[in-house]
Image (cartoon, helix red, strand yellow):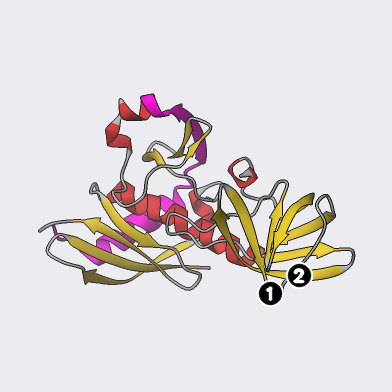
Amino acid sequence: MLYLEDNYKKEFQTSIIKTIENKIFLKETFFYARSGGQPGDQGTITIENKKLNVIDTVKEEGLFAHIVDQEVNISEGTLISAKILWEKRHRHMRMHTTMHLLCSVLPFYVTGGQIGYEKSRIDFDLGENKYDVQILESQINKLIEEDHMVSYQWITKQELDANPSLVRTLSVQPPNVSGKIRLVKIGEIDLQPCGGTHVKTTKEIKKFKFIKFESKGKQNKRIHFKVED
């Protein structure tokens, strides 16, 4: 999961571990595999001047499966070049960091969410609480303009268990990497476990646009939003 070290790596070279039908397993990868409401990366894998389109990336038996648009049968150790579809990845990064900004403004548990290219949604356990959407939109855009730095910290599961208030999501377990859990820190306004991809500073999000509120039961309220250039 090299994307945890560098969200901005767009191209890299590595070798193949194995191929199964239309799935390519690489020795190392910067692709993000679908999880936690964030789509898997798309892009290309080039093998001996033959370019294959990666249409999705998923987790399979502890490995990342790069799903391509045709069946392949390639020997282990074959060298490849890979390129992430950056426009889509970067949009997902902007969306994901925006979700964390919403968490900083709305102090409630997150009960679900889905990141998309055109729009995204996040569900909060708001109960009977009500929010003025214009004020909410203004608050988020103010945080974006303040240009808060996004950074990362690593803690143990024991440290996380000792600080349960760090966990904001009820539907997704924080990803555990070799006994460590990554925290995403946005300036001094938000800190929570997350294994997704994020921008370097909030200003990179550019602009938050509220689309609509939707009731998903007595407690859950869904916020639909998008980011604009």
Looking at the picture, how far across and down is residue 31, in whole percent?
64, 55
Q: Is residue 44 magenta?
A: no
- Identified by mark 2, the residue type is Leu
Highlighted magenta segment, given as a residue range: 129-158
Neighbourhood count class around disc 1 (C-alpha, 10 Å): few under 14, some 14–19, many 20 upward: few
| Image position of 149 (left or right of 5) | left
Residue 154's disc number: none
The residue lying toward the viewer, choosing from 11 and 146, is: 11
Q: State whether residue 63 is above or below residue 39.
A: above
Seen as rendered, the residue at the extreme right is 48
Give the image quarter of residue 189.
Answer: top left
Does any portion of residue 182 appear in the rendered image? yes
Q: Residue at x 12, y 64 (%)?
A: 218
| Image position of 114 (left or right of 152) | left
Tell me if label 2 and label 1 are in contact, CB under 8 Å. Answer: yes
The residue lying toward the viewer, choosing from 43 and 58, is: 58
Q: Residue at x 65, y 61 (%)?
A: 66
| Image position of 59 (left or right of 211) | right
First in residue order: circle 2 vs circle 1? 2
Residue behind mark 2: 52
| Image position of 32 (left or right of 25) | left
Residue behind mark 1: 69
* Disc 2 element: strand
Q: Residue at x 49, y 45 (%)?
A: 195
Looking at the picture, how far across and down is residue 170, in whole percent?
28, 49
Looking at the picture, how far across and down is residue 91, in whole percent?
54, 63
Q: State whether residue 180 is above or below residue 139.
A: above
- Identified by mark 1, the residue type is Asp
